Amino acid sequence: MTEGVKNQNEFFVMVSVIVLTYNHKDYISQALDSILMQDVNFPIEILVGDDGSTDGTSEIIHEYAYKYPNILFPFFRKHNMGATKNLRDLLEKTKGKYIGSCEGDDYWTDPLKLKKQVSYMETHPEYIGCVHSFTIVDEKGIPLKKQELRWLSKKKIYTLKDFKGLFLPGHPVTFFYKNIFYGNKSACEVIEKAHPQIGDRTIAMLLAAQGNIFQMDENMACYRRPLKNKNNLTMKLGEKADNKLIEYQMNDFLEAYAQNILGKRVNFNWFRRDLLFRTIIKCIIKPSQENFACLMGILQECKRRYCSKKSQ
C-alpha cells in the first residue's frame, strides 16, 4: 500500500470509469449513456464488469462494446463471482490517472461531471479524491422524499477519523480519486479479502489513509433505490440475518489492516457498538433463530476481541 500513485507519465488515460453490473437490464443503458455523454477533452476508458447476468444485461453491453470499441471494454463473468472480486479484477486493469465509478443501476446527470472533477483534482493535488451531491431515485428515476443515507458522512473535508468503520465520504456513484491501485496488487487484493460483496467501505478507508477527500457542492448523479423489486445489493444485504455479524468481522479486518499494514492509529469501536445495538433491537422487534444466532456470533466476537487485548 505504500507504493502510492504512480508518476503521471505512466498513465495511459486520464480517467478509468468502473461499472459493476448484475441483472441491470432495465437500467444499464442509462448508466452507460450517462458516462458516454461526458464532454471531455482528455482520454477515458470505461471498464464494465458483468457479474454473470442472466436477464439480458450482457447482450446490451455487447451492443455498446461493438459501438464504442475504443473506449468501452466489457468483462463478462461466466458465473457470479461476487461484487468485490469483480471490482478487484477491474481495478487491476485500470490505466487511468483517476478512477470514477457508476454501478449499472445508477447514472450520472451532468455531462461536465468528469471535467469538473478532473479540474478540481488537478488544481488541488493535496486531496486524494473528491465526491459530490446526488439524488436518490426510485426504479423509474423519480426522486424519493427521503434524500438521506445514514452511512454517508456530512463532512466537507473527509478524513480517516470520519470513517469510523462505516461512513463514506459520498455515495460510490460520486467517487472520483487518484488511482492508488495502479500497479499495486496488494491494495487490489484487500478489496476482495475484506468482504465478498461490500467494496466501497474498503476503498474509502484506503483512500482516507493516504489523504483527505473533498465534498463538492454540485449535484451530478443519481443513486437508484428500487422500492418494488429489491434487486439492489445494499437492500439485499440489509435483509440477511447474519449480515451484521459479517460486517462486524469486516470491521475488525479493516481496523487491523489500517493499523498493521498502513501504520495508522485508528479504532472503529463506534461501529462495533452500533452493530451490537442494532442487532439487539432486531432480536427484540423480530425474534427469530437467525437473528439470535447473529447476536450470539457478535457477542462471541466481542469476547474474542476482549480476551485478545487482555493477553497483549
Image: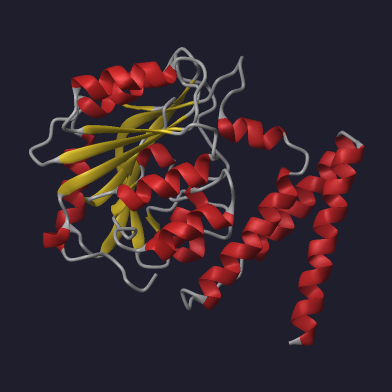
Quarter placement of the N terminus: bottom left
At horizontal 19% and vertical 28% (from top left) the residue drawn is 69
Residue 35 image position (x, y, % from top left): 26, 29
Q: Is residue 62 visible?
A: yes
Q: Is residue 210 above or below residue 35?
A: below
Instruction: Please tell me which residue lies in front, 252 or 24.
Output: 24
Q: Is residue 52 above or below residue 126?
A: above
Q: Is residue 271 above or below residue 221?
A: below
Q: Is residue 110 visible?
A: no
* Residue furthest out toward the left: 41
Residue 275 shown left or right of residue 6 in the figure = right
At horizontal 50% and vertical 65% (from top left) the residue drawn is 161
* Residue furthest out toward the front: 78
Instruction: Please tell me which residue lies in front, 149 or 199.
Output: 199
At horizontal 38% and vertical 16% (from top left) the residue drawn is 59
Residue 116 image position (x, y, % from top left): 19, 41
| Quadrant in the rendering for residue 34 | top left
* Residue furthest out toward the bottom: 312
| Quadrant in the rendering for residue 105 | top left
Residue 22 image position (x, y, % from top left): 49, 27
Residue 233 shown left or right of residue 203 in the figure = right
Quarter placement of the C terminus: bottom right
Instruction: Please tell me which residue lies in front, 183 or 116.
Output: 183
At horizontal 19% and vertical 33% (from top left) the residue drawn is 71
Residue 114 shown left or right of residue 54 in the figure = left
